[in-house]
Amino acid sequence: MAWARTYLKKAGLITNSERGVWSLTPVGQKTTKVDPESIKRQVRAMPGDSSAEGTEPTDSVMPEDVESTPNTWKQHLLKVLRALPPDAFERLCLRLLRESGFIQVEVTGKTGDGGIDGHGIVRLAGLLSFPIIFQAKRYSGSVGAEQVRSFRGAMVGRADKGLFITTGVFTSAARQEATRDGAPPIDLVDGEDLAEKLYELKLGVRTELVEVVIVEDDWFKGL
């Protein structure tokens, strides 16, 4: 997909106004069919094109295609999160919840409390509010149904809803247990979701846009 976008952009069929946002150019809108080989020949014939030799590098990333390899930064981020001390990770989750609109968020940090790491209040539309209890665990593996059941047992009588945040992944059985009929619901946030949320809130994650200067030879020929 990364190389397809690169070739189509150089051929003048698509453009990206900003990172991750692509659209058809006027030429692209009028094009009903694209011949891949023809596009490749056209792009490779352009002056200064790095693929003119006929080989496509597989270990390099074009500046506009950084978003095509999300696992690179996510894996790095999760590695950093898993190396945090338990209390630091809990404080990170507290900050995450506050930035997400929770109020009166507190970290309990008590041992033998059934895995409850903190609690807070969620407000909806500034009118409704309800308490929520959360658990924050740094796992590198899978979280199973047993951990979800244990967390639910600890939250019974304290809150109507729970939130389980982890740097690992949830098994299918854990996800089924979290939404089991007749039991208080538990929302699950795995490592992938956590990384996306930190990126969205710009907590410990920032983006850098690379400016690419292109000399338009055809423009000068039209003078």
Image (spheres, rainbow, N blue to C red):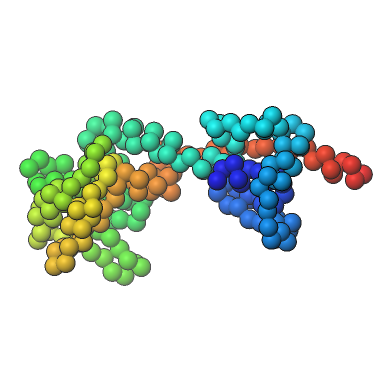
How many marks are shown on the rendered structure? 0
Indicate the position of residue 215 as horizontal and vertical percent values.
78, 37
Q: Is residue 64 left or right of residue 176?
A: right
- Residue at horizontal 29%, vertical 47%? 190
| Residue 208 as seen in the image, left or right of residue 124 | right
In the image shown, does 131 or 149 lie closer to the viewer? Answer: 149
Place of residue 191 in the rendered image (x, y in percent of width and height, measured from the top left): 32, 43
Q: Quadrant of residue 72?
A: top left
- Residue 32, position as x, y percentages in the image: 69, 61
Name the side, left or right, on which 12 lies relative to 174.
right
Residue situated in front as seen by the camera: 155 or 219? 219
State the residue at coordinates (23%, 49%): 171
Quarter of the image where the C terminus is located: top right
Note whether residue 109 is visible: yes
Q: Which residue appears farthest toward the right when viewing the image? A: 223
Camera-nearest residue between 18 and 140: 140
Q: Position of residue 127 (x, y in %)?
A: 31, 70
Which one is nearer the viewer's eye here, 31 or 131? Answer: 31
**Is 204 situated above or below 200?**
above
Q: Residue at x 60, y 45 (%)?
A: 4
Whether residue 91 is visible to the viewer of this picture, yes or no, is: no
Say which residue appears at 36% left-offset and 68% top-offset.
Answer: 125
Q: Residue furthest left?
A: 112
Q: Is residue 91 above or below residue 97?
A: above
Q: Quadrant of residue 44?
A: top right
